[in-house]
Amino acid sequence: MMASACSLPMPGTATGGPHTAANPWPGLGLLDKWAQWLAELRIDVDLSGRDIQREFDALHERIRTNHRTRDAMQPLPLYLHGLVLRMREADGEVFVYAIDPLRNRIVAYTVFNRLVEVDRHTDRHLRAPHTKVAHGYRRMGIATAIYRWWLDSGRSLMTGARQSAGAHGLWMSLARDYTLAAVRIAEHKRVQQLPLPPPPGFFDALDTRLVLVGRGCRLADFVQPSTRKG
């Protein structure tokens, strides 16, 4: 259930227009440093385009033959190169599908996963996105548009234990328009903000993550303040 406007409401429409950053980090120099730190991030395995398309075709067939899943699909008001976007929600997770109507195929897929690592309070505010895009549909801004839709709807994102190299660049691009923070999953599954700059080896530990704060949300709503020793 939703506790506030920033705790995972289902959006009605996508927002447009220019994005104004709430990022407390002035200038782009720090983002450049983040880009260097991100080189240390734990890298996920990137499947080939052929493997992903086979996975999408099997997924499309399961949806086509399961009337409950098919009927749960809702249109998503995003318009990208003639693609049709559909979404559904199940068990607190949101699934977004980009479909090429000319080929009648799923060509991109995003799931906003719940984070079992965090406590119930934090779970109301954060999801971890994971996107796959078929070969031939990459560099079309599909993931960027879906993530912006999510963030502009007043919901926040946290990285999972691993990210693909492409996801690093996407998060850095979004950090120019949304607040980016470094956090650690602390005791009792609470999320604690880390001081900047992060210490060496920050990305080596599986409990260190990045957060993008959704439009109209506050980091303080779901993250404990940072503490600096010394």
Image (cartoon, rainbow, N blue to C red):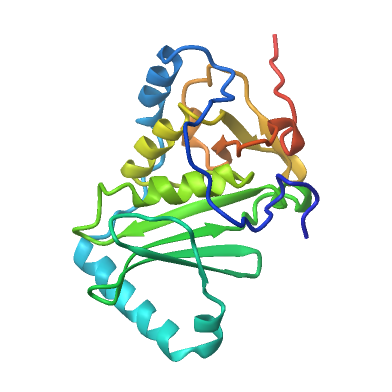
Apparent side of residue 37 relative to residue 55 in the rendered image (left or right): right
Which residue occupies 53% across, 16% down?
A: 197
Q: Is residue 152 above or below residue 176?
A: below
Q: How many marks?
A: 0
Which residue occupies 60% across, 63% down?
A: 93
Apparent side of residue 103 relative to residue 8 in the rendered image (left or right): left
Q: Is residue 152 above or below residue 127?
A: above
Quadrant in the rendering for residue 48: bottom left
Q: Is residue 194 above or below residue 143?
A: above
Q: Is residue 61 above or below residue 128?
A: below
Out of 122 and 133, give the one closest to the viewer: 133
Looking at the rendered image, the quarter that the C terminus falls into is top right
Residue 213, horizontal then vertical, whole percent: 60, 36
Apparent side of residue 23 relative to residue 59 in the rendered image (left or right): right
Which residue occupies 23% across, 73% down?
A: 102
Out of 100 and 203, give the one closest to the viewer: 100
Which residue occupies 35% across, 46% down?
A: 164
Out of 117 and 67, give the one closest to the viewer: 67
Residue 161 visible to the viewer? no
Q: Which residue appears farthest toward the front when viewing the image?
A: 17
Looking at the rendered image, the quarter that the N terminus falls into is bottom right
Residue 71 visible to the viewer? yes
Quadrant in the rendering for residue 173: top left
Residue 167, horizontal then vertical, whole percent: 38, 43
Residue 96, horizontal then vertical, whole percent: 47, 63
Apparent side of residue 72 relative to residue 121 in the rendered image (left or right): left
Q: Which residue appears farthest toward the right when viewing the image?
A: 3
Residue 64, horizontal then vertical, whole percent: 41, 86
